[in-house]
Image (cartoon, grey):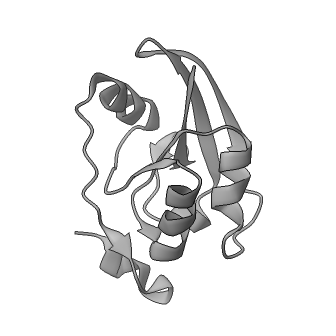
């Protein structure tokens, strides 16, 4: 069983990880989605969300952009980070499971200028 979380808003991958509306969590087995749930974003505090998701057993996080601090914590917790993604959240997860979703490695360095994260 693999758990894949997507930072999302209205079923779409959101641009900024920390300020998303919620996380869609997909359970996958043998490259198939078997279950999905949406949990509300419990609040943006530095370092909190990566641990919150890792504690829920998440193996992969998919987002549009993400700050370097969050990426470091995910890396420490052995959670794979895929950034630079947009569009439908479920489609992104299916692409990941097929091996066609690639991370662009776009990390946000300036939180107050989130529009600079967009490539």
Residue 26: horizontal and vertical position, in percent? 57, 28
Residue situated in front as seen by the camera: 115 or 70: 70
Residue situated in front as seen by the camera: 49 or 12: 49
Residue 99: horizontal and vertical position, in percent? 26, 29
Q: Residue at x 67, y 76 (%)?
A: 46
Query: Where is the N terminus found, in terms of image quarters?
Result: top right
Q: Residue at x 73, y 54 (%)?
A: 52
Q: Could one spot residue 91 in this view of the protein?
A: yes
Vertical placement of residue 99 versus 51, above or below: above
Q: Is residue 3 left or right of residue 39?
A: left
Vertical placement of residue 64 versus 48, above or below: above
Residue 94: horizontal and vertical position, in percent? 37, 25
Vertical placement of residue 81 versus 30, above or below: below
Residue 102 quadrant: top left
Vertical placement of residue 20 versus 35, above or below: below
Residue 44: horizontal and vertical position, in percent? 69, 70
Query: Where is the C terminus found, in terms of image quarters?
Result: bottom left
Q: Could one spot residue 40 in this view of the protein?
A: no
Residue situated in front as seen by the camera: 35 or 57: 57
Q: Residue at x 49, y 88 (%)?
A: 112
Residue 36 quadrant: top right
Q: Is residue 56 left or right of residue 30?
A: right
Q: Is residue 105 left or right of residue 33?
A: left
């Amino acid at each position: 069983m693999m758990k894949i979380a997507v930072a999302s808003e209205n079923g779409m991958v959101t641009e900024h990880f920390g300020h998303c509306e919620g996380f869609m969590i997909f359970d996958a087995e043998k490259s198939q989605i078997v279950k999905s749930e949406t949990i509300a974003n419990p609040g943006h505090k530095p370092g909190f969300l990566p641990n919150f998701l890792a504690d829920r057993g998440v193996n992969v996080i998919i987002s549009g952009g993400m700050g370097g601090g969050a990426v470091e914590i995910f890396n420490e917790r052995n959670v794979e980070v895929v950034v630079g993604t947009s569009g439908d959240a479920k489609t992104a997860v299916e692409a990941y499971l097929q091996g066609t979703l690639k991370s662009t490695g776009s990390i946000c360095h300036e939180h107050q200028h989130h529009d600079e994260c967009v490539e």
